[in-house]
Image: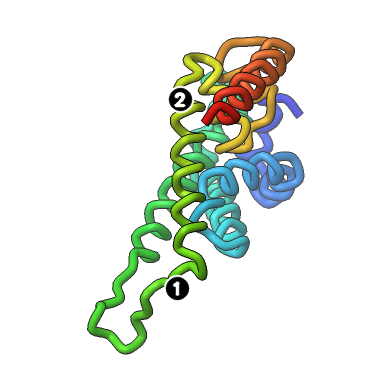
Amino acid sequence: MNDAEWELLLHTDQRKACSELVNTFANLVYAIAANKLGSVASREDIEDCVSDIFAEVLRCAPSYNASAGSMKAFISAIAKRRSIDAFRRISRLSVCTDSIDSDDFAMPAAPDNIEDAVDDDLMKHQLWEAVKGLGEPDSQIIFYQYFYCFKVSDIAGKLGMTPAAVQKRSLRAREKLRMVLEKR
């Protein structure tokens, strides 16, 4: 369906438009919501946000104009804004309100072996410093790939490189990291 057809459908039959919007854009909207909320929200919260997004799309439908932009861009903008609002709301609710004096407050468990925990922390710090020491764009590639779990194609788009170049630089950067960490 092209954008002019979406505009006509939204202005003539909102019930059918709602059904078509969900069928066409559900995956996109869910992906946007999950991307923004994944770190703080449960699956149910994400699904609630998706529902809210489609309700907002229908509420804003009269203002949609095909000549101003595509339906995909219209829905994506609403999804992004609503997901960020939900993120803020959920983050605010999950702030720890426990008091140390409370009976329910518990100290985090100490690791069984303090020396191993210190060694792990030291290794993490060394790894972090080694990755930062790779220089740009190698450090960015490693951060995106292993700390943020981005796909090579997404990294390529963010850094303005080809996926093949990202793969090659990633391979070389990992080899540099291995050598640096073996020396330590």
Q: Residue 128 carries which label?
A: none
Specify which label sits upstream in the sequence, 2 or 1.
Answer: 1
Q: What element carries label 1?
A: loop
- Label 2: how many Cα within 10 Å (few below 14, some 14–19, many 20+): some
Q: What element carries label 2?
A: helix
- Residue at 52 percent of width and 59 percent of height: 41
Q: Mark 2 points at which residue?
A: 132
Residue 73 in picture, x, y percent from top left: 57, 28
The residue at the far bottom in this view is 103
Residue sitting nearer the eye, 130 or 157:
130
Residue type highlighted by circle 2 = Lys
Q: Residues within 10 Å of mark 1 (few under 14, many from 20)?
A: few
Percent across and percent down for residue 153 are 69, 22
Instruction: Looking at the picture, tell me which residue is in the foreground, 45 or 25.
Output: 45
Q: Mark 1 points at which residue?
A: 109
Residue 29 position (above or below residue 106): above
Query: Horizontally, is 114 left or right of 178 in the view?
Result: left
Residue 66, by quadrant, is top right
Separation of residues labelled 2 and 1 (CA atoms): 31 Å
Q: What residue type is labelled 1?
A: Ala
- Closest to the observer, 20 or 118: 118
Residue 119 pos. (x, y %) = 49, 50
82 displayed left or right of 13: left
The image quadrant that residue 61 belongs to is top right
Q: Which residue is drawn at 51% across and 35% down?
A: 127
Residue, x 62% and y 43% (percent of image)?
Answer: 29
Hey, which quadrant is residue 69 in on the image?
Answer: top right
User: Is 101 rendered above or below residue 108?
Assistant: below
